[in-house]
Image (cartoon, grey):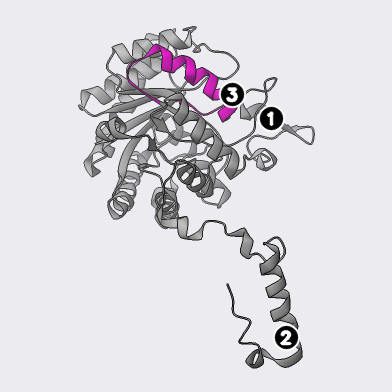
């Protein structure tokens, strides 16, 4: 399904669910683990509904960091199956309501060490467990994301291929254009394509301006579909990834990133630039909320369910167009002097 859609048009992904749920008070900053899917599933369903109504064509199951290595840090290792299964079930329910696609999700494990062969087996085991629990509720494909080691990305791809599902494999780059195991960006993605990845791309760490130049190089390297999922936080050339931005003399990550949030217009421009560049899957990562996605969808020329609530600033009393402001002021003055019953001729526009 995802591959057919990509053949026909750009596919718009969703946003940064973990960060948005942290802002809403349902995820703990630090571990950023998704036990919210069993503790407050209604909050996950609402956010994913918000993304769907904003124009997302893919809903990712909230299983980022839902693996044994992270869950054991918070004493929730025993909920591995329940979290992974519930996350896909919720995503499936929302996706079915809006006729869109569900992506199962795998992420970096923090247990992979390219110098330690034992960790290869452990990493694969963690991916296999997550896939086993997620696949029961019918994801349409799998997104494996935020890998800094090519070796770990390859293991995720192997695990997805073992269940014969389409794959989107993304890697993250911080201050340079090489993986942590020293592989140049172009070589890394070419290897993933050669190993059978259906979609390859770049996600997290960088904002759109700092990600798209790397994506342009990627697009020239591979013949498969290409994805971008930047953060919605403003970065700079001297501080190229969002975790090292400073606010008021302190590192802003993760609790003081608010001043760095990109506007909806900046994310809309990103969507247009990505499409012009030939990016096939245009998504977003940390900091991206539903209002960003709606602006991206509308910039791509789409009308989505929540377009009915898109801005109509000319009707605002203070910043609207002059004729409307005059009409509003006339109505207020009339009502103050004569009462509403005598001012019916000043109808709202």
Tell me the distance, in whole angstroms, between the alpha carbons under discs 1 and 3. Answer: 14 Å
Residue beneath label 2, please? 334
Quarter the C terminus occupies: bottom right
- Answer left or right for 186 relative to 292: left
Residue at the spot x=62%, y=29% of the render? 242
Residue beneath label 1, please? 245
Within 10 Å of the Cα at label 1, are there few (<14), some (14-19), or many (20+) other Cα atoms? many
Which residue of the protein is positioned furthest toward the right in this rendering?
249
Picture disc at residue 104: none
- Residue 291 located within the stretch drawn in magenta: no
Name the spot of residue 328 as percent of width and height, x first: 69, 74
Disc nearest the viewer among 1 and 2? 2
Within 10 Å of the Cα at label 3, are there few (<14), some (14-19), or many (20+) other Cα atoms? some
Q: Quadrant of residue 264?
A: top right
* Element marked by disc 3: helix
Name the spot of residue 104 as percent of width and height, x first: 32, 36
- Answer left or right for 151 relative to 89: right
Residue at the spot x=36%, y=21% of the render? 123
Tell me the distance, in whole angstroms, between the alpha carbons under discs 2 and 3. Answer: 54 Å
């Amino acid at each position: 399904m995802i591959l057919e859609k990509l053949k026909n048009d750009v596919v718009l992904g969703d946003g940064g669910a973990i960060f948005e749920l942290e802002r809403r008070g349902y995820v703990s900053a630090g571990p950023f683990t998704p036990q919210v899917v069993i503790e407050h599933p209604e909050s996950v369903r609402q956010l994913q509904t918000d993304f769907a109504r904003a124009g997302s064509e893919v809903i990712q199951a909230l299983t980022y960091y839902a693996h044994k290595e992270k869950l054991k840090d918070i004493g929730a290792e025993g909920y591995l199956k329940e979290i992974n299964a519930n996350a896909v079930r919720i995503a499936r329910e929302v996706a079915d309501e809006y006729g869109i696609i569900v992506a199962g999700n795998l992420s970096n494990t923090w247990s992979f060490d390219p110098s330690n062969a034992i960790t290869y087996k452990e990493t694969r085991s963690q991916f296999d467990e997550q896939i086993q629990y997620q696949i029961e509720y019918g994801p349409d494909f799998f997104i494996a994301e935020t890998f800094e080691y090519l070796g770990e990305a390859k293991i995720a791809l192997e695990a997805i291929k073992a269940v014969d599902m389409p794959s989107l494999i993304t890697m993250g780059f911080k201050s340079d254009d090489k993986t942590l195991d020293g592989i140049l960006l172009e070589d890394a993605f070419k290897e993933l394509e050669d190993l059978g990845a259906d979609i390859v791309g770049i996600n997290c760490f960088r904002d759109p301006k700092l990600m798209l130049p790397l994506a342009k190089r990627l697009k020239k390297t591979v013949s498969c579909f290409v994805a971008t999922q930047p953060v919605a936080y403003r970065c700079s050339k001297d501080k190229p990834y969002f975790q090292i931005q400073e606010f008021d003399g302190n590192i802003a990550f993760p609790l003081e990133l608010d001043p760095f949030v990109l506007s909806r217009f900046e994310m809309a421009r990103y969507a247009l630039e990505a499409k012009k560049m030939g990016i096939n899957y245009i998504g977003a990562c940390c900091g991206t909320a539903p209002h960003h996605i709606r602006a991206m969808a509308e910039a791509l020329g789409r009308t989505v369910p929540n377009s009915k609530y898109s801005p109509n600033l000319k009707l605002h009393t203070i910043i609207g167009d002059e004729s409307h402001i005059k009409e509003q002021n006339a109505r207020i003055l009339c009502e103050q002097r004569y009462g509403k019953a005598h001012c019916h001729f000043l109808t709202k526009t």
